[in-house]
């Protein structure tokens, strides 16, 4: 049973949100500058036999086409702020949950609660609470795993799906599928047995140590995660590859570097949004968030056993690759996209010059990519226009 517990309006403290001009195929969406941010509604839904709760933000017209944004590690609903504001301004109904283990959602410390079979129950409870039967789903990082599993096992609730940074067919299929795509020219097996995924192996083998390090100073750790990324030379290994070998992050040091090591101007998201994320992670700690990394085998088994079309996705799919991603090297390693290109019947791909947190670092580029894809591939869900005639007339010259 699901029950929506709260419905409250809140206004974001970001007052200068600007939507740059978005050019789409045949349609130009003019720039919109808001004097004040579009207000968010706050909702909490209770679901499941053990009465977990999941919190979500919503904005935009209630009858607008629905987009659900699913964040990854680490994040909260508000980390999608640039996307929520942009697409609500265009007439979409936008929703973003604090994923289980984060923010104002239930933060159990039981690792099995973070198997994707359990995670999608919460996200589908959010969909049900909106009163809709379908949505356009957008995921990033672990949010991609959730979105892709929903698309594969519950395609009827997906009008279209978009993944940022992580291609379809990787993380949701388990560690074996991930390791099969490692570029061994960059990551020789004897030196980097887990490739750039050494940090994932560190979670699996030294979980308590990993979490203790992050919890020593969540603020500082987050500053390093959300700083402007290093652009590694072509063929250079990611620093994440050495996490297991070094016995931890930053070369295996005992504590995160001081907060002062990353200046505010070097953060890739607005300071007020970052501060909300810090407060949320200081409240829950990193243990529940880290549990997502402990269910690779269970996730792969569930995804395979419940696939509706042998892994094929028949709905429109967008994949946004981040050129300088230190987590997923799909922009430089073609092995990472082979499965996706085989299994997605209607696939659009693009590359943005950004690091892993592409939606925060290059928000306008990300929004433009999603908008163009929606106009070209999901025309019937574009707000307003497509229920009436909207046709370019022949040139008179």
Image (cartoon, rainbow, N blue to C red):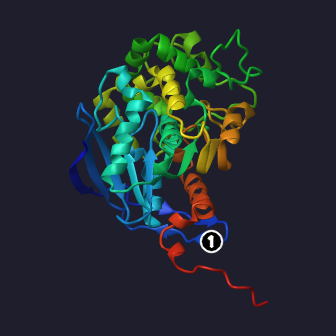
Q: Nearer the viewer, residue 92 or 281?
A: 92
In the image, residue 397 lies at what x, y percent?
Answer: 79, 89
State the residue at coordinates (47%, 22%): 298
Instruction: Name, please, the residue furthest toward the left.
Output: 5
State the residue at coordinates (68%, 35%): 339
Q: Nearer the viewer, residue 55 or 156?
A: 156
Question: How many numbered marks are there?
Answer: 1
The answer to whether 322 appears left or right of 382 in the picture is: right
Looking at the picture, does residue 203 appear above or below residue 119?
above
Quarter assignment of residue 215: top left
Looking at the picture, does residue 28 appear above or below residue 221?
below
State the residue at coordinates (48%, 10%): 205
In the image, residue 74 lies at what x, y percent?
Answer: 43, 33
Quarter assignment of residue 89: bottom left
In the image, residue 304 lies at what x, y percent?
Answer: 54, 29
Quarter assignment of residue 212: top left
Q: Nearer the viewer, residue 357 or 131?
A: 131
State the residue at coordinates (31%, 37%): 103
Q: Which residue is mark 1?
A: 27
Q: Nearer the viewer, residue 238 or 315?
A: 315
Looking at the picture, does residue 354 appear above or below residue 215?
below
Secondary structure type for disc 1: strand
Camera sees residue 268 = no
In the image, residue 161 lies at what x, y percent?
Answer: 54, 49
């Amino acid at each position: 049973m699901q029950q929506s517990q709260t419905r409250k309006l809140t206004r974001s403290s970001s007052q200068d949100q600007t939507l740059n001009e978005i050019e789409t195929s045949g349609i130009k969406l003019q720039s919109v500058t808001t004097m004040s941010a579009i207000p968010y509604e706050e909702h909490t839904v209770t679901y499941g036999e053990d009465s977990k709760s999941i919190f979500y933000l919503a904005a935009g017209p209630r009858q607008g086409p629905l987009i659900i944004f699913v964040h990854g590690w680490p994040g909260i609903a508000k980390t999608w702020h640039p996307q929520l504001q942009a697409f609500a301004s265009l007439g979409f109904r936008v929703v973003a949950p604090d994923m289980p283990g984060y923010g104002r959602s239930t933060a159990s410390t039981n690792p099995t609660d973070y198997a994707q079979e359990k995670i999608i129950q919460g996200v589908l409870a959010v969909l049900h609470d909106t009163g809709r039967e379908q949505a356009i789903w957008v995921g990033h990082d672990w949010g991609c795993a959730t979105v892709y599993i929903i698309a594969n096992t519950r395609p009827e609730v997906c009008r279209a799906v978009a993944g940022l940074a992580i291609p379809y067919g990787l993380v949701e299929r388990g560690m074996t599928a991930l390791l099969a795509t490692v570029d061994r020219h960059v990551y020789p097996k004897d030196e980097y047995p887990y490739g750039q995924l050494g940090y994932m192996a560190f979670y699996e083998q030294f979980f308590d140590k990993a979490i203790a390090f992050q919890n020593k100073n969540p603020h500082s750790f987050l500053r390093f995660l959300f700083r402007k990324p290093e652009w590694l030379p072509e063929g250079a290994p990611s620093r994440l590859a050495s996490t297991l070998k070094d016995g931890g992050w930053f070369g295996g040091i005992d504590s995160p570097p001081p907060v002062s090591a990353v200046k505010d101007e070097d953060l890739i998201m607005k300071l007020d949004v970052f501060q909300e994320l810090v407060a949320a992670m200081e409240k829950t700690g990193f243990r529940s968030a880290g549990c997502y990394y402990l269910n690779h085998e269970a996730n792969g088994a569930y995804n395979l056993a419940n696939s509706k079309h042998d892994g094929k996705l028949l709905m429109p799919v967008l994949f946004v690759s981040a050129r300088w991603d230190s987590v997923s090297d799909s922009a430089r390693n073609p092995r990472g996209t082979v499965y996706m290109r085989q299994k997605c019947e209607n696939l659009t791909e693009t590359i943005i010059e950004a690091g892993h947190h592409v939606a925060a670092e290059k928000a306008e580029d990300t929004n433009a990519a999603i908008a163009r894809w929606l106009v070209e591939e999901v025309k019937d869900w574009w707000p307003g226009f497509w229920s009436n005639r909207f046709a370019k007339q022949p040139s008179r010259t």
